Amino acid sequence: MGVLDTDRRVFALAFARMADSLGNSFLIVVLPAYVGSIVGDAGAAVAGVSLSTTLLVGIALSVFGLLNSGLQPLTGRLSDRFGTRTGFILSGLLLLGIGSAGYPFTDSYPALVALRALQGVGAALTIPATVALVNELGDPDTRGGNFGVYNTFRLIGFGFGPLAAGAIQQFYGFDAAFAVAVVGAAVGFLLVWALVDDPEETGAAAGDDVSLAVRGESTLLDPVFTLGVATVVMAMGISLFATLEAPINERLDQGAFLFGTQFGVAVLANVVFQIPIGEASDRYGRRPFLLAGLVILVPSTLVQGFVTTSATMIVARAVQGLAVALVFPVSLALAGDIAGEGQSGSTLSVLTTGFGLGTAIGPLVSGVLGGVDYVAPFAFVAGLGVLALLLVTTQVYDPETDDTPGPGGEPTPRE
């Protein structure tokens, strides 16, 4: 199956997520400056405690991720229980748009945080339901390609947004930047409303228990939980880079342009390889690509702590982006293969939650360990990558090609 044969509803979801990601990624660049314009350089007192502007910015940005990641297991299971996906997606996009529309009318820090929290809830409604729907619109022969298409367009929106946000804010002001975020949510809403419907459901099979399954039936650890752990490590590896801009530029004797290139090349490699890798995993099975991605992730992360030239850092980041393209869409497809009927939302939310946690933890790890030693954050995450590789090798199997867990062999075409 080729890209052109992809279900039109998957394309609609992919374009909707691209539009929404573009708008939301604007806020990553714009909100720190907007918080500064509200509280000033000296910071502000919150609940009687004096906080610096930097800390206030961190709180405003992190509340989104905390609510988004924390609520996804619940919202994913609820979308299973109600047997609908589009209702959750549309509700989430509506909340994201309302939040962006409210920022220009906000002149207090608590109100700004409340709007960002509202958007965190919106994202938690949207993301698990979207990946569940992408999963249900495919089968083991198309699921990898579907997730490749979906993630490619999502990353295009997320990667392009910050590039445009700074220019729009500088030349047209905060209101224009927030308007772009509103338009992104609105475009996503219209695409889903007009072009996407739920596949026929045979009933909601999800139970009342929203706890995370850790123990497996034929393995020590649940395979989806193990994939979630690997996703956390993968996301940490790709996200720890941003916090280290100053020491990286000093070590490599480079400026902001080359740092931006190094940051962006990982996203670019991820975009380029997602679709072909996803489609190949449909044909040859998931585990060979997943294991290859984790094998590549470890040295490509570690070497970033030792390179001494800008060019080699670009190469290392590109290889790391390839590793992410091997791990994430294939993990989503494999979790979809494992998920029971009517349980896509709760099952795949383990991975989307893991990705959110990884992107939140990565900068924190690099901020703490980077102050101790330049190499330490890269070495720490690479070590976690080795652990993730061992766990996936022993605890995860492909239900379409493997009868029992194990390291697997050469990829063989599926029947």
Image (cartoon, rainbow, N blue to C red):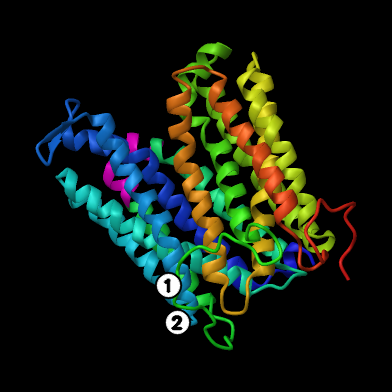
Location of mark 2 (residue): 82
Name the chief secondary structure element in magenta: helix
Location of mark 1 (residue): 88
Q: Is residue 259 magenta?
A: no
Q: Nearer the viewer, residue 250 or 412?
A: 412
On screen, residue 411 versus residue 71, left or right, reads: right
| Residue at point 48%, 22% (across, down) | 370
Does label 1 or label 2 sit earlier along the sequence? 2
Tell me the quadrant of the picture where the C terminus can be found. bottom right
Q: Look at the numbered discs 1 and 2 and tell me whether their residues touch, using CB distance below 8 Å.
A: yes
On screen, residue 193 versus residue 52, left or right, reads: right
Q: CA distance from mark 1 to mark 2?
A: 10 Å
| Visible residue check, residue 344 | yes
**Three-letter code for the amino acid on which mark 2 is drawn:** Phe
Residue 334 screen position, x and y as percent:
69, 62
Residue 322 screen position, x and y as percent:
70, 41
| Residue at point 77%, 59% (across, down) | 279
Tell me the quadrant of the picture where the N terminus can be found. bottom right
Q: Residue furthest bottom?
A: 202
The quadrant holding residue 282 is bottom right
Q: Looking at the image, how many numbered discs can be counted on the residues? A: 2
Q: Which residues are magenta?
A: 167-178
| Visible residue check, residue 172 | no
**Three-letter code for the amino acid on which mark 1 is drawn:** Phe
Residue 119 screen position, x and y as percent:
33, 57
